[in-house]
Image (cartoon, rainbow, N blue to C red):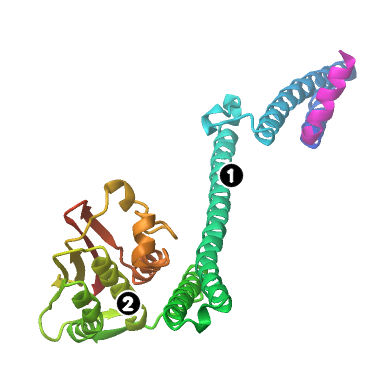
């Protein structure tokens, strides 16, 4: 019992100065207004006893609250809590309880975010390794075949060289895409915003993409906005967006057409790229902007592409304070759209 009292008094030492101050005030009051020394001495003893008892009670309460806080902190350290609501303190510590709950929730979210980043990093490295290995192994295979004697066979040597060259081009595209997305996500890619004539700009891109559409007998049509419409953006980076979206539309459309439209709104110009292709399921729409995500891996490899194009598109559009929207129905077609400021 004595040890417990000692612990209580030790815990209440933080209030000792205040108690001494009030005791001195009371004792001075006794000496100034009470002439009977016996009564004064009795009151002083009573005051000291009451102070001792009061300090013991305060120390006990403070020690209990401190132990309660220590228990909660230990529980957090040992991962004993799954939800903030499981953290409970006494009514007097309600404000502290709220703060600890908020801290716990923030730390838990931060840890989950770090774990997600680690998973993404691991997946990204695995995907990069796989994507790099594919063209490198293909190039290596063609070169080894040529060195083993095919180089002297005029029937196949040019074929193998063409194939090896195509894989080097694919490898170059992949590396450029990796550099682009790395610069975008690290904030190192500088944007150059200015107003430009949207009709002239898109017409030039359409002319560049027309041979690809003609090769598949697909109509590539542009529905222009009003003459002289100026939109605000980075022309160089936006060309990556238009080229990627139109190229994807052509690649995944077997018959029909690809349409590019500009719809004028009060403050924006809405860009729409619409096709009559294979479409995308609702389940896949939520993930198509992830790095290296492919709806149909076998088909994606057959038509080419790095798996980074839409991720780059998303980042560039968001850098223009816009958002890319997708509407699609399997077997009917897809529509990608975003807005640029007027």
Q: Secondary structure at mark 2?
A: helix
- Residue located beneath label 2 in the image: 238
* Most frequent secondary structure within the magenta stretch: helix
Q: Position of residue 284 (x, y in %)?
A: 33, 50
Q: Is residue 35 above or below residue 268?
A: above
Residue 239 in magenta stretch:
no
Residue at screen point 51% across, 83% down: 152
Q: Position of residue 217 (x, y in %)?
A: 16, 72
Quarter of the image for the N terminus: give it.
Answer: top right
Nearer the N terminus, badge 2 or badge 1?
A: 1
Residue at screen point 81% across, 21% down: 47
Quarter of the image for the C terminus: give it.
Answer: bottom left
Q: Position of residue 223 (x, y in %)?
A: 11, 75
Q: Position of residue 116 (x, y in %)?
A: 53, 49
Asked whether, in this view, residue 53 is left or right of residue 131, the answer is right
Q: Is residue 153 above or below residue 54?
A: below
Residue at screen point 71% across, 32% down: 74
Q: How many marks?
A: 2
Q: Which residues are magenta?
A: 1-15
Whether residue 21 is visible: no
Q: Are marks 2 and 1 in contact (CB under 8 Å)?
A: no
Q: Secondary structure at mark 1?
A: helix
Asked whether, in this view, residue 253 is left or right of residue 289, the answer is left
Asked whether, in this view, residue 65 is left or right of residue 195, the answer is right
Residue at screen point 16% across, 64% down: 255
- Residue located beneath label 1 in the image: 107
Binning the other alpha carbons within 10 Å of mark 1 as few (below 14), some (14 to 19) or many (20 upward) gives few
Whether residue 126 is visible: yes
Q: Is residue 338 above or below residue 82?
A: below
Pick whichever, 196 or 45, lies toward us. Answer: 196
């Amino acid at each position: 019992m004595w040890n417990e009292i000692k612990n209580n008094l030790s815990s209440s030492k933080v209030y000792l100065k205040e108690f001494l101050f009030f005791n001195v005030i009371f004792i001075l009051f006794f000496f100034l207004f009470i002439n009977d020394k016996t009564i004064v001495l009795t009151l002083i003893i009573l005051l000291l006893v009451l102070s001792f008892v009061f300090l013991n009670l305060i120390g006990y309460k403070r020690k209990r609250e401190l132990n309660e806080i220590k228990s909660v902190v230990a529980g957090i350290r040992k991962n004993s809590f799954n939800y903030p609501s499981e953290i409970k303190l006494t009514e007097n510590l309600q404000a502290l309880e709220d703060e600890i709950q908020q801290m716990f929730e923030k730390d838990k979210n931060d840890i989950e975010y770090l774990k997600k980043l680690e998973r993404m990093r691991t997946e990204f490295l695995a995907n990069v390794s796989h994507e790099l290995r594919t063209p490198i192994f293909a190039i290596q295979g063609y070169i080894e075949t040529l060195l083993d004697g095919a180089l002297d066979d005029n029937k196949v040597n040019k074929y193998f060289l063409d194939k090896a060259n195509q894989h080097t081009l694919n490898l170059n595209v992949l590396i450029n895409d990796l550099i682009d997305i790395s610069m975008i996500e690290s904030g190192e890619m500088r944007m150059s915003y200015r107003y430009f004539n949207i009709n002239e700009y898109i017409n030039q891109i359409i002319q560049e993409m027309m041979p690809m559409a003609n090769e598949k007998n697909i109509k590539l049509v542009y529905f222009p906005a009003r003459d002289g419409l100026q939109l605000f953006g980075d022309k160089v980076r936006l060309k990556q967006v238009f080229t990627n979206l139109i190229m994807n539309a052509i690649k995944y459309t077997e018959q029909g057409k690809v349409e590019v439209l500009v719809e004028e709104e009060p403050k924006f110009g809405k860009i729409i790229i619409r096709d009559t292709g294979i479409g995308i399921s609702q389940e896949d729409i939520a993930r198509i902007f992830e790095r290296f995500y492919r709806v149909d891996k076998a088909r994606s490899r057959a038509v080419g592409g790095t798996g980074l194009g839409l991720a780059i598109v998303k980042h560039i559009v968001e850098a223009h304070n816009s958002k890319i929207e997708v509407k699609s129905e399997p077997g009917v077609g897809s529509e990608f759209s975003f807005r640029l400021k007027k």
